[in-house]
Image: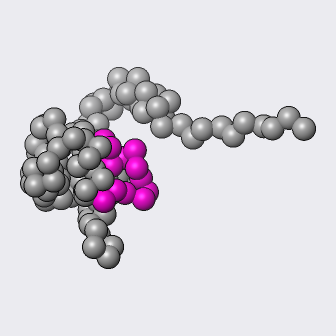
Amino acid sequence: MESEEAVLALAALSQTTRLEAFRTLVRHEPDGLAAGDLARLLEVPQNTLSAHLSVLSRSRLVSSERQSRSIIYRANLGAFRDVAVFLLRDCCGGRPEVCDPVVQTLQSCCAPKRKERSRA
């Protein structure tokens, strides 16, 4: 990833509505959300949200797909991963223990949920 791409993605997330839109789309992966549903969840007018989604799309953090009369938006987790890796790649300067707390936090928040065993 180039610096320009990272700056574009970070700039896209630097506005409250866009950040909340992205976070909401992440919670609805992999199915995504229709633009109208996302607007209702965020309590934002659809035309305003459309402008925000356009910024997120240009930054590659969000993708869209037409399904019948709706446009379904999805978080592009691969692009987000690229930004996170770009930010952290050189953070430790060859000393992994410096970045270890960040990595551990990411692993704990994203760990797969265990299935509960049913008692028979």
In the rendered structure, the answer to whether residue 96 lies left or right of residue 87 reads right
In the rendered structure, the answer to whether residue 84 lies left or right of residue 116 reads left
Per the rendered image, the range of residues in magenta is 23-34
* Residue situated in front as seen by the camera: 5 or 56: 56
In the rendered structure, the answer to whether residue 54 lies left or right of residue 100 reads left
Q: Please provide percent x and percent y for residue 81.
A: 33, 48
| Vertical position of residue 115 compared to residue 35: above or below | above
Rendering quarter of residue 106? top left
Q: Residue furthest bottom?
A: 68
* Residue situated in front as seen by the camera: 20 or 45: 45
Q: Residue at x 54, y 37 (%)?
A: 111
In the rendered structure, the answer to whether residue 111 lies left or right of residue 18 reads right
Q: Residue at x 17, y 44 (%)?
A: 44
Q: Residue at x 43, y 57 (%)?
A: 30
Q: Residue at x 41, y 53 (%)?
A: 29
Q: How is the image coloured?
A: one colour
